[in-house]
Image (spheres, rainbow, N blue to C red):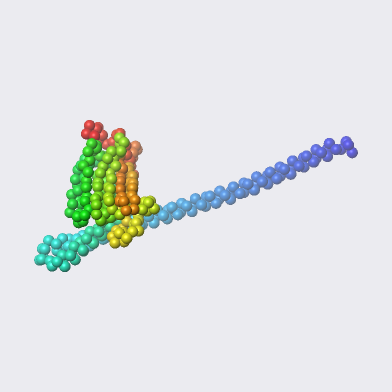
Amino acid sequence: MSSSEPGTAHDTDASALTRQLAESRQESDDLRAELEETNRGVVALYAELDAQAEQLKKATELKSRFLAYMSHEFRTPINAIRSITRILNDRMDGPLTAEQEKQVGFVETMASELAEMVDDLLDLAKIEAGRVEISPAWFEMVDLFSALRGMFRPVLGNPATALIFEEPEGLPKLYTDDRKLSQILRNFISNALKFTPEGEVRVTAMRVGDDRVRFSVADTGIGIAPEHHAAVFDDYSQVDSPVQKRLRGTGLGLSLSKQLATLLGGHVELESALGEGSTFSVTLPVQLRRRPGTEAQGGEDGWGWNGQGGPGNEQHAGQA
């Protein structure tokens, strides 16, 4: 018996190793099968995500095309209404009674508000479709403020609210799209005047570091509670307040301003407290230029910002 014990032990060890090897192979096969199943699931998930992304892209394109089409279709009747109201206000067809003048003024106001809404919708559609043209040029900020002052002077109907433009001093020329910047500031100013029953709306510009400028529109109006700050720049967003319910609006102006600021290489900010007024600001680079390698691109995709160089920098470096 003793002579056979080493062989028996050897056989036992071999059998144990065989079982372990078989178990390891089975575990490996199970793991491989599980991995293959997981991979199939991942591939299916990616395919589903791609399909949903394509559907979302098509839906966005259809929405943008619809908004652009409807905006253009609305422009003709709106312009016709505004032309008629101008003719009536000019008394070209005879005098108006006090009540008629009041009603014509009401129609003119409503048509102007509708025209602004259509313009905002059309601009948003262009941004979503990537068809916004960025046309930067050198300009003085004092000229920008002068133009804005002239735009708002005829529409300041509330003598209890003052619109103040602080003269920009010691600031360089800007190389950006002045029309887009003007549109952002017009939205800020219009919004501030709407929600400031009395007091002032103050427009300022200041340099931030060496390569940026911040434009601010501060008011002494009703203010915005902190919990609403994150939503004010969303599409169609309107703060729930008694004043808001009495005033018409689409909630597009601030959203559009945020997207325009991004296209110009900048960003928007809000500081506000309920009952203490609000300050909306946009910070932009002093010089806007195309990002390297995008010189041949159209639209807004190739534009970025640079604080040191830029198109025309050599010509205007001494004027900054």
Image-based side of 65 in relation to 111, left or right:
right
Compared with 12, 160 (above or below) is: below
Residue at figure coordinates x 17%, y 60% from the top left:
83
Closer to the camera in the image, 184 or 271: 271
Compared with 81, 151 (above or below) is: above
Image-based side of 1 in relation to 229, left or right:
right
Image-based side of 36 in relation to 77, left or right:
right
Residue 175 image offset from top left, x and y in percent: 26, 39
Q: Quadrant of residue 67?
A: bottom left
Q: How many marks?
A: 0
Q: Quadrant of the N terminus?
A: top right
Does the image show residue 222?
Answer: yes
Residue 98 image offset from top left, x and y in percent: 14, 66
Does the image show residue 136?
Answer: no
Residue at figure coordinates x 81%, y 38% from the top left:
9
Residue at figure coordinates x 17%, y 54% from the top left:
154
